[in-house]
Amino acid sequence: MGMIAGDLAAAALAHWPVLARELGLDPASWRAAPLARREDGRVARILLRMEGPGGARLVMKHEARPEDPEKFAAAMAAHLAVQEVYARGVPEVLAFDVARRACVMAYLEARPLSGLLEGAPLAAQGALLSRAGAWMDGFHRALSGERRVFQPRHTLRFLRGVIAEVVSGERRVADPQRFLACAGAFCADQALYEGRETITAQTHGDLHLRNVVMDERRCWGLDFAGGRVVPVGHDIARLLGDYAILHAPKAAIPEGEVLPPEVQGAFFEGYGLVPAEDPSVQLLLRNRVLAEWWGLPAKAEDRGPAQARRWAGVQALAGRVFPGL
């Protein structure tokens, strides 16, 4: 078997023979090539493209850190639950080993939505997010919950706790006075989201832009985090909030809104389970801006390049969502 350099890759390849034999494959007849990796203080994860006889391709994933077999098992269970009811929307998991925190999946000739959006003009961004909306619509319908009255108090109770921690100094955030002004204005609008219905579904749990991949025709979801049955706005806000912070042209966003109207309209052309005006969507989109704010390091010198970019996006977006603050 061909080898690639690196301790993380070597750790992954050490598990390949067991998984290959489970699939009835000769492990020695396959070569490995790097596909993606993440390695920081919290996570060490690698994806390898395995190339075998006759041009066959598979993906092997290994999570070296965190060393948490229960979490890995939960992620596999979440993926398999979606695979059972929405097979066209996920890459097929072919084999996995919880103790080794490794799995083998079908190979997709696809790119992450994050990369496709990078530098794309507004119309192209809308077209991509319309496709992502259609994928999410199918996912939520496959594991739908019920129609219920949305309860904004749960989200806002947590936010008020964060506000109290910032005021007391227990929690540090960048530009705390502006954060408190924006968060206070948001809490004051609680009545706008009360007494209105939404729809629940089994959610992804971590639906950022890198966890949706596409080719020219199809779209798939990855790395299901075993989300709860909650209002669908949780997944929608996670995905569209990520877009608004990192990719949306801020000048195209009207004051008081989170998204350019063209992009919001395009997404909800693809996603039809709830409309753009759904209370869970509108509240959780705005809360996402604040959650990203309090989740970033307070000091500029403590932010890496990706965090610095996200911070710049949060600040620019906050100026549109909370005008005058």
Image (cartoon, rainbow, N blue to C red):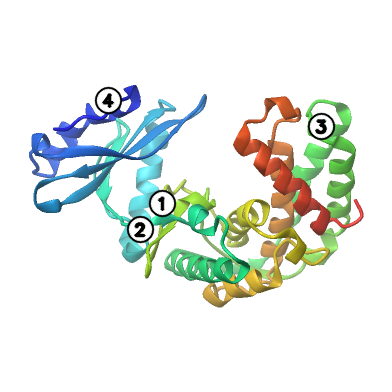
What kind of residue is marked 1? Answer: Leu
Q: Name the spot of residue 140 as percent of width and height, x first.
A: 48, 65
Could you classify mark 1 by the number of other residues whose Cα lies within 10 Å: few (under 14), some (14-19), or many (20 or more)?
some
Mark 1 vs mark 2: which is more N-terminal? 2
C-alpha distance separating marks 4 and 3: 44 Å
Residue beneath the point at 18% across and 45% down: 51
Mark 4 vs mark 2: which is more N-terminal? 4
Q: Are marks 1 and 2 in contact (CB under 8 Å)?
A: yes
C-alpha distance separating marks 2 and 3: 40 Å
Residue beneath the point at 9% across and 38% down: 29
Q: Quadrant of the N terminus?
A: top left
Q: Which residue is mark 3?
A: 165
C-alpha distance separating marks 4 and 2: 27 Å
C-alpha distance separating marks 1 and 2: 7 Å
Callout 3: SS: helix
What kind of residue is marked 4? Answer: Ala
